[in-house]
Image (cartoon, coloured by chain):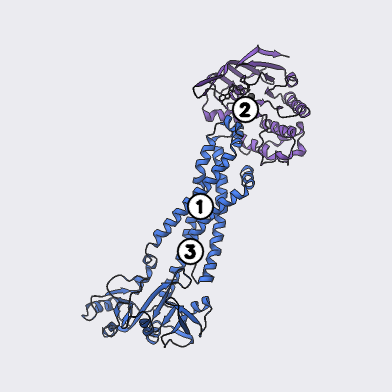
Chain colours: A purple, B blue
Amino acid sequence: MRTILKAENLKKVYRVGRVDVHALRGVSLEVQEGEFLAIMGPSGCGKSTMLHLLGGLLTPTEGRIIIDDEDLTAASDAKRTDIRRRKIGFVFQRFNLFPTLTAEGNLRLAERIHDDGGDDPERRREVLRLLRLEDKMHHKPTELSGGEQQRVALARAVVTHPAIVLADEPTGNLDTENSAIVLNMFQELNYRFNQTIIMITHNPEAAAMCRRIVQMRDGLIVEPPGGVQM
Amino acid sequence: MDSLVTANIRQRPVRSLVSAAGVALGVALVMLFTGLARGMSDEMHRRSSNVLAEIIFTRPGSMELTSSMTNLSVKYVERLQAIEGVESAVPVIRYVSQGGKGFGFEQIEGVDWEPFSRMNNIALIEGRAPAANDEIVIDTTKAQNGNYKPGGVLQLFGGKPYRVVGIYAPESGARIKMSLAAMQDALESPGKCTYILVKCKQGYDQVAVAKNIDASPTTSGNKIQFTRDVFVNIEKSIPYLNVFLRVLVGLAAVVSALVVMLAMYTTITERTREIGILKAMGASRGYIISEIEKEAILISLLGLVAGFIAAFIAGILVQRLYGLSFEIAWSWALAAAAIGLLGGALGALYPAMRAANLDPVSALAYE
Ligand SMILES: Nc1ncnc2c1ncn2[C@@H]1O[C@H](COP(=O)(O)OP(=O)(O)O)[C@@H](O)[C@H]1O
Ligand SMILES: [Mg+2]
């Protein structure tokens, strides 16, 4: 097993006017290649902040992040964007598909950004088969159900072979049935492609599918320092 | 073509069309004005090249093509004819009036038909020479554009009716001519003319003849110009035409830039979250700027094509309806194209940079 992500003593302070909000107070985390990890905790405890830091959308006030042997915290803004492009796939609660593009267009856009022009039809076919999206490719997001939209978003995140998928409450906008389908697909991706996934969730059933759960509270990981191993 | 770019253009068809129309307006204005200026000067050149007199004799002071002064006494005709090397001297009154339909300007000449037509080798192909004070002859182009025939009536000098009695060819100088006496009468300047055309005898050099005129005590002290010089510089003789055209091109560029800037600015505000998504997907600043620039350039390109088509149609209409010449000046067309595209690209630059500089997390949270 190989360590694919290492976060050391992450702190994040937001300045709101004259007030400092300590969103993260020193979080350390190690994730191995192929892990499916859940982050749980009450609202406002710093989960999203943590995920944004790991994906290079934010910079920590203190601490270090190494992703797939690259130091994210030492990198320039442009370099961080580049690492994100090559190594990270984001999935959000609100799907965040491009509404003007079809499912296919959304996937192609990801491929184009990832790797100027060179797409991998084999990978795309595999991903679409796994997520059972083959017949949805020519639909616009508004013509798809929430569950289908989230599957397209998931496909878009993994079609470019990211080292890590970062998902922020991916089932937060879905009903029970669709949540189960989407969670199943996360599990499939993890199992078939050995895809490393870090998923924030409020849903205990979702967390139960993960091999490891990390609990956060008030900007800290509380239970246990390494996370619960299932 | 990039699907996000074209999808965005199609997503907001009204915005895309309005901004393309803004670019088109600038481009069409440039094309139309330069086309008309070129057409006008080409036409004048063609007409003036049928003036066979080598020398134009006027009072001191510059002879503007647009002037309608009648300050030269026709007594000079006899004096000029007495000078060595002069074959004939023909007085001309030129009057420039606001065009009949309020656009452009129209020239009328008063000449004694017989000596003028002999000097310049023009002939009546229909009807007869003007005699009475309310009679005129016109050239074939004027007859065709206005659909005039002998017997038809034209209003000149702000509403006075004149009867067409003849049609001549080829075109030479003003398209409408009446007798010198009729013109003197209309302008209330008996015994006066605007200039005198001087034709040299065969075997005489025009420069030598000009020197003779200048040296003779009866004619010295006046302005002597060579026809070839006067008509070569027609574009220069319409005062500030080129300055005007340059200002117009500059304004067109500003209009294109502003319209595209506004369009792209509203677009990126509307698509803030999409820009956040692009950033989350790892799109670089350069990628985001180039996407927005591509969209702006595509819109400008649409505007450019529309502007060319609009200018072309407007040019033909102006030609048909007003009898003005319109000739596309390709060098200006190139300038208009460059300006439409450059204006669009530059206008989009600021919104594009703003988009590229957005903070990804707050962009993703944007409602
Ligand atoms: N951009 C921001 N500016 C100021 N405070 C913020 C900002 N983003 C998050 N916070 C604060 O940081 C804390 C952690 O937020 P967040 O990471 O979104 O928590 P969670 O995802 O666990 O609900 C909260 O108190 C929140 O109000
Ligand atoms: Mg959150």
Count the numbered circles shown.
3
- Image position of B13 with respect to A95: above or below: below
* Spatial CA span between label 2 and label 3: 57 Å
Residue B86 position, x and y percent, is 30, 83
Do the residues marked 3 and 1 share a common chain?
Answer: yes
Which residue in the protein does label 2 denote?
A87
**Most extreme residue toward the left, as rendered?**
B217
Q: Residue at x 46, y 69 (%)?
A: B102
Q: Does the residue tagged 2 have its C-beta within 8 Å of any atom of ligand 1?
A: no
How many residues crowd around disc 2 within 10 Å: few (fewer than 14), some, or many (20 or more)? many
Identify the residue under disc 1.
B340
Q: CA distance from mark 1 to mark 2?
A: 41 Å
Say which chain tag 3 marks.
B
Residue plotted at (47% across, 59% down): B332
Q: Residue furthest front?
A: B159
Q: Chain of mark 1?
A: B
Q: The residue under label 3 is which amino acid type? A: Gly
Which part of the image, by quadrant, shows the C terminus of chain B? Answer: top right
